[in-house]
Image (tube, grey):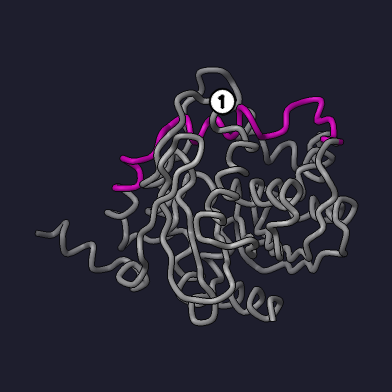
Amino acid sequence: MRFAKSWMFTHPVTRHVQDGYFENDGIRQHYVTLGEGQLIVLLHGIPEFWYSWRHQIESFSANYQVVAIDQRGFNGSGKPASTDGYRVERLVEDVAALIRHLGRKQAVIVGHDAGAWLAWHFAALHPEMTERLVILSVPHPNAMREELAEHGAQHEASEYARKMQVEGARPMFRPWQIGLLMDMPALPLYWSADRGTDADAITSFYQLNYPREPYALDETLPIIEAPTLVIHGKRDRFLLASGHEHNARWLKHEPKTVMLDADHFVHQEKPVEVNKIILDWLK
């Protein structure tokens, strides 16, 4: 009875979103949607799931159709047959398949953490499907490589990532831990997501996608054509603000960059500010 009652303390948006499923690469994937209008696709980080965006879904859905995906291997989505299926190029095609599944040609792409890494790549590889790009926390992949190559503060901050790049490494964090940190009353929801999350979905991001020494630039990544907004928490201990200083080199348009007094989970720590910044920029 106590367990059932605790579900009542999840964010109110959980009572209003509609569940949906699409398939790509032989994998059935889950998403939630709310609202009507221009499409906004929200891409969560690691080790989270769609609920990471609860505050944004509630706010944006007044004027947009908002879709928050469970990335492959997380929560309600299936996992690939092998860890190779977690390469960012495969994840990019999941987002493209989702947009087509919804009968759309374009979307505003919003990503945080590993979802931002995916968002950068999606915008570069699918400019025709990216109306606008909103990035939370993660510098452009090549800006990140430059920061790491300097073996400075970002290299130190990324020690946790290098530990998970070791063959056979296990996840250093799980969804339930994010629940403890960000939304204790909704912990049963995070426990449920934890049970549905593949450990390889967490470690494979770092082993297959996170930059490795010697941190050579990815010269094959096209210049991003979409107008871009970057929001960053100045107290982020994992992804330092200095990395964003070089983003513009790989963008067609000068990005709008906003620094907030927040840590890594900026959209959950400062939802009112983040939502206003994004909505004002989209207008």
16 over 105 or under it: above or below: below
Please name the residue that numbered disc 1 is placed on. Answer: 84
Image position of 249 (left or right of 111): right
- What is the x, y in percent for residue 273? 60, 76
- What is the x, y in percent for residue 246? 87, 52
24 over 95 or under it: above or below: above
Residue at 55% x, 45% y is: 94
Q: What kind of residue is marked 1?
A: Asp
* Farthest-out residue, front: 103
Q: Is residue 42 magenta?
A: no
- What is the x, y in percent for residue 26? 45, 34
Q: Which quarter of the rendered picture does the C terminus lie within?
A: bottom right
Give the class, few, some or many, for how many residues have Cα within 10 Å of label 1's Cα (few <14, many ≥20). few
Residue at 65% x, 37% y is: 89
142 over 213 or under it: above or below: below
Residue at 87% x, 63% y is: 253
Q: Which quarter of the rendered picture does the N terminus lie within?
A: bottom left
- What is the x, y in percent for residue 5? 16, 64
Q: Is residue 207 magenta?
A: yes
Residue at 79% x, 68% y is: 256
The foreground one among 74 and 131 is 131
214 over 135 or under it: above or below: above
What element does badge 1 sit on? helix
Q: Which residues are magenta?
A: 192-219
Image position of 57 (left or right of 280): left
* Farthest-out residue, left: 1
Tell me the quarter of the picture where residue 16 sits: bottom left
